[in-house]
């Protein structure tokens, strides 16, 4: 006796950088739960577990319609036992008990509040929690020494935790553009990060600055920062010398986090690709390059480990071509 069943299964390539993922998500209930568990793992410095949940969520985001049964998931990549348990729980019971209990836990709530302070990472938050500090008031009363970033972060806590809208981003773009062309005529500024991917809100605004003549961009970052400061736009700045990157808060009607990246024109395409995100898309591109092509990709260059040469590119399209990947436009990198 034979029995036959026909099920429609989804087919999805295994690297997120091989897939087109728009902002339209048909499985938000599932991916929200997995994202919460990923965030909890990341905040607990369990990076591997975090990535596993992120990859699972990314596969579900790429599906063309809502998942209704576990059988539809057969053959899909990146769905580990743990993620499958979470999905099953939601499909059967409407919610994930693990995600719900995590969300309610004192530890998760404290980690969220404390890492919500600009300048506070998972390590610092964990140390404070072990010392019994679970919230902002307890932190202030504890007499802990805060560095300058954290002081600014605490002072502007509400502003910095309020999402930045596209309208905010447009206003800030104009200001940064003015700064850039004032200090170096001919310099060019590009919106990167989530807003380049078409997101309507974000936690900050990201810009990439370059000049068409190689070398003219040298020393540009401190000049842009000084200009912003002289105009009264700067609240706090942190510059990492070697990465030529600056994070600053700008006082407008509210404080907003801004990331500035300066790149020489020869590296522009790599910086553009490397800073457009999403974070998982970037991670997957580098994993693809390393594991499938024996190449090393960074936001500065692409190195072919076999031929032992740097591969040049003047556009994102060329980099995808070097990697043997179909070009995915920014709006479809929302993994
Ligand atoms: P974010 O601003 O953190 O992320 P986002 O813009 O995608 O999301 P949001 O809307 O919440 O701001 O980072 C922008 C991109 O920069 C991100 O997709 C990955 C990349 N990136 C880093 O975040 N850090 C790095 O050190 C490098 C090299 C790249
Ligand atoms: Mn951003
Ligand atoms: Mn950023
Ligand atoms: Mn690896």
Image (cartoon, rainbow, N blue to C red):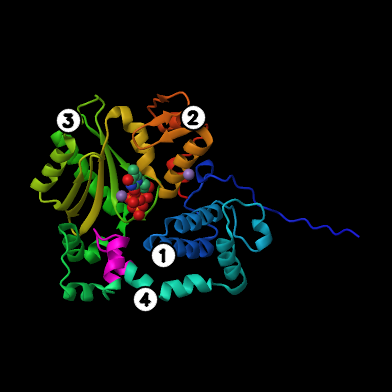
Task: Reply above or below: 206 against 138.
Answer: above
Instruction: Determine whether 307 is above or below 292 in the image.
Output: above
Q: How dense is the environment of label 4, judged by Cα within 10 Å: few (below 14), some, or many (20 and up)? A: few
Q: Which residue is mark 4?
A: 106
The residue under label 2 is 321
Query: In this picture, which residue range is highlighted in magenta?
Result: 112-129
Q: CA distance from mark 2 to mark 4?
A: 48 Å
Q: CA distance from mark 1 to mark 3?
A: 45 Å
Q: Is the C-beta separation of discs 1 and 3 under 8 Å? A: no
Disc 2 and disc 3 in contact, CB within 8 angstroms: no
Q: Nearer the viewer, residue 132 or 329?
A: 132
Q: x, y percentage for residue 101?
A: 46, 75
Name the residue rendered at 29%, 53% in the picture.
Answer: 204
- Residue assigned mark 3: 185
Q: Is residue 124 left or right of residue 290?
A: left
Front of the two marks 2 and 4: 4
Q: Quadrant of residue 148?
A: bottom left
């Amino acid at each position: 006796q034979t029995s036959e069943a026909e099920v429609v299964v989804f087919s999805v390539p295994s690297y997120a950088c091989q897939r087109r993922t728009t902002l339209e998500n048909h499985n938000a209930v599932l991916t929200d739960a997995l994202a919460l568990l990923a965030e909890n793992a990341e905040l607990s410095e369990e990076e591997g577990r975090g990535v596993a949940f992120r990859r699972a969520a990314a596969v579900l985001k790429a599906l063309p319609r809502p998942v209704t049964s576990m059988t539809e998931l057969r053959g899909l990549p990146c769905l580990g036992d743990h993620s499958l348990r979470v999905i099953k729980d939601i499909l059967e019971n409407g919610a994930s008990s693990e995600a719900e209990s995590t969300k309610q836990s004192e530890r998760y709530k404290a980690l969220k509040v404390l890492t919500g302070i600009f300048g506070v990472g998972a390590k610092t938050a964990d140390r404070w929690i072990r010392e019994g500090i679970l919230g902002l008031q307890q932190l202030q009363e504890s007499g802990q020494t805060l560095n300058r970033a954290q002081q600014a972060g605490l002072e502007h806590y509400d502003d910095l935790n309020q999402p930045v809208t596209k309208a905010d981003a447009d206003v800030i773009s104009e200001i940064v553009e003015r700064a850039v062309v004032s200090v170096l005529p001919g310099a060019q500024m590009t919106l990167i990060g989530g807003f380049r991917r078409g997101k309507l809100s974000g936690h900050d605004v990201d810009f990439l600055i370059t000049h068409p003549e190689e070398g003219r961009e040298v020393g540009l970052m401190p000049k842009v920062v000084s200009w912003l400061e002289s105009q009264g736009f700067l609240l706090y700045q942190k510059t990492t010398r070697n990465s030529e990157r600056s994070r600053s808060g700008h006082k407008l009607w509210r404080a907003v986090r801004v990331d500035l990246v300066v790149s020489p024109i020869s590296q522009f395409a790599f910086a553009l690709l490397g800073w457009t995100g999403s974070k998982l898309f970037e991670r997957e591109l580098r994993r693809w390059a390393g594991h499938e092509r024996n190449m090393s990709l960074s936001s500065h260059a692409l190195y072919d480990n076999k031929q032992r040469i740097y591969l040049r590119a003047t556009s994102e399209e060329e980099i995808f071509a070097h990697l043997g990947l179909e070009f995915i436009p920014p709006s479809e990198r929302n993994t």
